[in-house]
Image (spheres, rainbow, N blue to C red):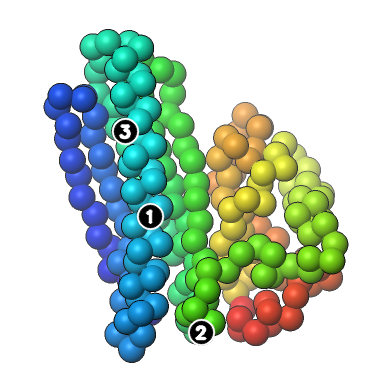
C-alpha cells in the first residue's frame, strides 16, 4: 500500500473557527475494493472529528455569544505499513475560544488487507481471559511512574516492535503524560493469539 498525504484548511468567518486537516490517502492499485474501503474508513474518522467540532462550536456560540477564533487541527502518523498491514494514529487538537486550554484526543485505525478486515484488539489477544485487564496491569507495571486510566486500551497501533497505546487526557491522568506507551510482543506473548504471528510482525 502507498500513502499520499492529503489535507485542507478552511476558515469560517461567520462561526469564527478554522479547520486544519491532514489525512492519508491510501493507494492499493491491485486491490481497488480494499483501497476504497480503507479510504472510506479514514474519511469517516475525519468527518466524525469535524462534525463533533462543529456541534461544539454551535453550543459554545450559543452559550458565549460573540467569540474569538476557535480551531480544529487533525493530523496523523503511520505506525506500520508493510505486508498488507496498515496501522495509523490520528491526533485531534481542539481549542474553543473562551474555554481554557487545548483538548487533545487520539484515535487509531488498523487494517489487514490480506483478510480484508479492520483489526480489533480482540483479534490479537486471548479472549478466554480478561485480556484488557491483563494488558492494563502490564502497562501499569511497566509505566509505574504515570497514572493510566482503564480506557488506555481503547485505541492501539501495531508495528514490528509491539503494540502501542496513544495517550490523551481520557487515558492518562498524570500531569505530564508521554505521547504513548508500548508493550513489546515479547511482553505480551503469554496472552496473544496465533494471529499476531500470522501478521508477520
Mark 2 lies on a secondary structure that is: loop
Identify the mark at residue 114; answer none if there is no mark: 2
Identify the mark at residue 54; answer none if there is no mark: 3
On the rendered structure, is 103 left or right of 133? left
Furthest toward the bottom, the residue is: 30
Contact flag, marks 3 and 1 (Cβ < 8 Å): no
Image height of 43 relative to 171, above or below = below
Contact flag, marks 2 and 1 (Cβ < 8 Å): no
Task: Give me the residue at 79% from left, 65% from top.
Answer: 127
Return the disc, 3 or 2, that comes first in the chain's sequence. Answer: 3
Q: x%, y% of residue 142?
A: 77, 52
Task: Give me the residue at 60% from left, 74% from top.
Answer: 160
On the rendered structure, is 182 left or right of 159? right
Question: What crowding class fits label 3: few (fewer than 14 Cα within 10 Å), some (14-19), or many (20 or more)?
Answer: some
Task: Give me the residue at 32% from left, 26% from top.
Answer: 57
Return the disc, 2 or 1, that comes first in the chain's sequence. Answer: 1
Mark 1 lies on a secondary structure that is: helix
Q: x%, y% of residue 17?
A: 24, 29
Q: Using the rendered view, name the quadrant where residue 170 is placed.
A: top right
Image height of 115 relative to 108, above or below = below
Image height of 15 relative to 172, above or below = above
Contact flag, marks 3 and 2 (Cβ < 8 Å): no
Is residue 142 visible to the viewer in this orientation of the structure?
no
Return the disc, 3 or 1, that comes first in the chain's sequence. Answer: 1
Name the residue beneath numbered marker 1.
44
On the rendered structure, is 154 left or right of 56? right
Q: x%, y% of residue 162?
A: 65, 67
Amino acid at each position: 500500500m502507498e500513502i499520499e498525504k492529503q489535507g485542507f484548511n478552511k476558515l469560517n468567518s461567520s462561526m469564527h473557527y478554522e479547520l486544519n486537516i491532514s489525512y492519508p490517502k491510501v493507494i492499493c492499485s491491485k486491490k481497488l475494493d480494499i483501497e476504497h474501503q480503507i479510504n472510506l474508513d479514514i474519511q469517516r474518522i475525519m468527518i466524525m472529528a469535524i462534525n463533533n467540532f462543529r456541534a461544539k462550536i454551535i453550543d459554545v456560540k450559543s452559550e458565549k455569544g460573540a467569540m474569538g477564533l476557535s480551531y480544529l487541527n487533525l493530523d496523523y502518523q503511520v505506525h506500520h505499513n508493510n505486508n498488507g498491514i496498515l496501522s495509523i494514529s490520528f491526533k485531534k487538537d481542539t481549542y474553543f475560544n473562551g474555554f481554557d486550554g487545548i483538548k487533545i484526543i487520539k484515535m487509531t485505525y488498523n487494517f489487514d488487507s490480506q483478510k480484508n478486515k479492520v483489526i480489533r484488539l480482540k483479534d490479537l489477544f486471548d479472549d478466554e481471559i480478561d485480556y484488557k485487564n491483563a494488558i492494563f496491569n502490564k502497562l501499569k507495571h511497566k509505566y509505574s511512574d504515570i497514572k493510566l486510566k482503564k480506557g488506555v486500551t481503547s485505541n492501539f497501533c501495531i508495528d514490528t516492535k509491539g503494540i502501542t497505546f496513544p495517550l490523551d487526557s481520557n487515558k492518562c491522568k498524570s500531569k505530564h503524560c508521554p505521547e504513548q506507551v508500548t508493550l513489546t510482543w515479547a511482553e505480551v506473548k503469554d496472552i496473544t493469539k496465533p494471529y499476531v504471528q500470522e501478521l508477520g510482525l
